[in-house]
Amino acid sequence: MIQQPPIKERIILGIDPGTQVMGYGILKVLGNKPALEAMGVMQLDKYENHYLRLAKI
């Protein structure tokens, strides 16, 4: 079996889905050290139905 080299860098996307507000966060992990790259929210309550909200995401 071929041995894979260890992963040194990872990008992690976290999503908190909601029907009114959706939150997200992006982490970069170098070795064992996580660092926050970005985070924020999307206000979805201004869209009148779930189809429009999903299209916005």
Image: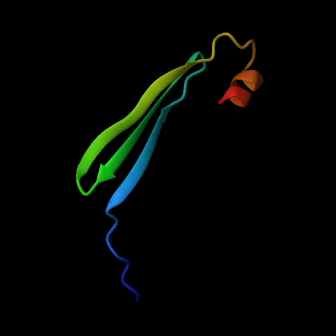
Dividing the picture into quadrants, the one containing residue 7 is bottom left
Asked if residue 26 lies left or right of residue 42, the reply is left
Q: Identify the residue shown where x is 31% and y is 71%.
A: 6
Asked if residue 56 lies left or right of residue 20, the reply is right
Nearer to the camera, 44 or 9: 9
Residue sitting farthest toward the bottom: 1
Nearer to the camera, 47 or 37: 37
Q: Identify the residue shown where x is 42% and y is 46%.
A: 12
Nearer to the camera, 18 or 13: 13
**Scheme of image coloration:** rainbow
Q: Quadrant of the N terminus?
A: bottom left
Q: Position of residue 28 (x, y in %)?
A: 36, 47
Q: Position of residue 52 (x, y in %)?
A: 75, 22
Count the numbered circles shown. 0
Q: Identify the residue shown where x is 46% and y is 24%.
A: 40
Q: Is residue 11 above or below residue 15?
A: below
Q: Quadrant of the C terminus?
A: top right
Dividing the picture into quadrants, the one containing residue 35 is top left
Q: Identify the residue shown where x is 49% and y is 34%.
A: 15
Asked if residue 19 lies left or right of residue 13, the reply is right
Q: Position of residue 22 (x, y in %)?
A: 54, 24
Q: Is residue 47 above or below residue 23?
A: above
Residue sitting farthest toward the front: 37
